[in-house]
Image (spheres, helix red, strand yellow):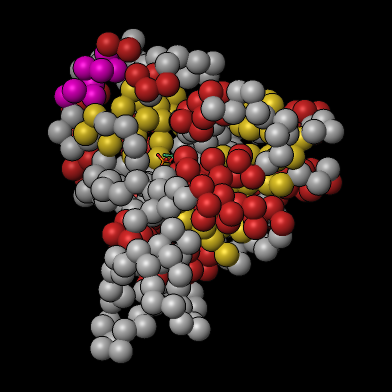
Amino acid sequence: MKTETIAIHGGNAVTDSLKPVIQPITLSSTYEHQEESMLYGRLENPNRKSLEHVMAALEKGLDAAAFASGNAAANAVFQALPAGAHIIAPDDMYHGLKSLLETVYKDKLKVDFINLTEPALVEAAICPDTRLLWIESPSNPLLKISDINRLSAIAHNRDLTVVVDNTFASPIFQQPLLAGADLVMHSNTKYIGGHSDIIGGILITGEINAFWKRIKAVQQLAGAVPSPFDTYFLTRSIKTLPYRMKAHAANAGKIARFLIQHPSVEKVYYPGLETHEGHAIASSQMQGFGGMLSFVPKGNARDADRFIAHLNYFTNATSLGGVESLIERRSRIQGVSEGIPEQLIRMSVGLENPEDLLEDLEKGLKLLQ
Ligand SMILES: *Cc1c(COP(=O)(O)O)cnc(C)c1O
């Protein structure tokens, strides 16, 4: 099966003798004891199984474990590590995961946040306790590109597990397991759900090994599992994921090229631009550049806020990956830090007609001249 066919037929496991075309939602928390059956809803559920199946197929993996949020998925990886383990994580890491490591795991794990675009820095940071390399590419919010192939080779040389947060790319544009990663993580809240109405997360593995079995134990015993409703709607959304991603990327590419030539814009971060630092690597490891971009407008934070308030089709809200365009001044969420100027604007480009989006941005940017 090719990608679009997997997206439609890879989930949707119909076992009902009435043969409905679409898999029903199984709400039952328990099952009658028999030879071939499920046991209990925390351990497994038919709708969850379908979601795990289609995501494993799209990521070219062997198995998947779905969770109640992206953070819960990442948390299962951290929980599966031995106490005192050292992790190498990206300096431009999704802020919610960075906070998780810095608060909940403060006394349990050691973390170094490294610029992963410089593989030599990663190699130098590996110590005897290092167990895990966490990659996020493209990263949030600076759209940094890490060389998954090269970093995986360095990590495997020292027996580390490599995890890639593939949320921004989606499995349509990037399959990290094929580039050497061991695990892939997604916030299903974003492109997988695609309609800004579900919180969810998932891990996919390329191998069934002892570490994966520990992660499955965290899923089933710690029990941060998604509901049958959520997993049903995620499997439903995935049917259109390949087409949504192509349209998100086409719209984002148009907006990036419009912004970069605009006199009121100082800098644009989009891996599809030839001027982006990671463009060559992105071109070799991605099949599309995604729907996320950031840019620095002329002026200060107040000017950036005025620009955002003036827009009609971009809602001033955090999160990403839905059909509607969202925009925000990123430091409102994660504060000002190195490399993230206070006027940096992050945009999740939706599926509106690109001409309407460009016209809206043009009008807004006039305020800054
Ligand atoms: C949103 C997001 C997460 C966390 O996912 P939740 O579903 O909000 O828990 C992790 N990584 C990235 C890149 C994200 O965008």
Q: Quadrant of the C terminus?
A: top left
The picture places residue 5, in percent across and down from the top left corner, at: 42, 75
Q: Residue at x 27, y 31 (%)?
A: 317
Say above or below: 62 vs 135.
below
Q: Which residue is drawn at the image coordinates 72% and 30% (left, top)?
A: 84
Q: Report the magenta stretch's main SS.
A: helix
Q: As rendered, which of 18 and 138 lies closer to the eye?
A: 18
Q: Give left or right: position of 343 versus 285.
A: left
Q: Considering depth in this image, is 223 or 267 the residue closer to the camera?
A: 223
- Left or right of 362 in this view: 216: right
In depth, the one of 181 and 148 nearer the eye is 181
Instruction: Tell me residue 305's x, y (percent).
Output: 25, 18
User: In which image quadrant can residue 20 be found?
Assistant: bottom left
Residue at 60%, 67% in the rendered image? 62
Left or right of 151, for residue 278: left
Q: Which residues are magenta?
A: 303-310
In front of the other: 131 or 214: 214
Picture quarter containing residue 86?
top right
Regarding ligand 1, which quadrant of the image does it lie in?
top left
Question: Measuring 15% from the left and 33% from the top, which residue is drawn there?
Answer: 312
Q: Is residue 21 above or below residue 317?
A: below
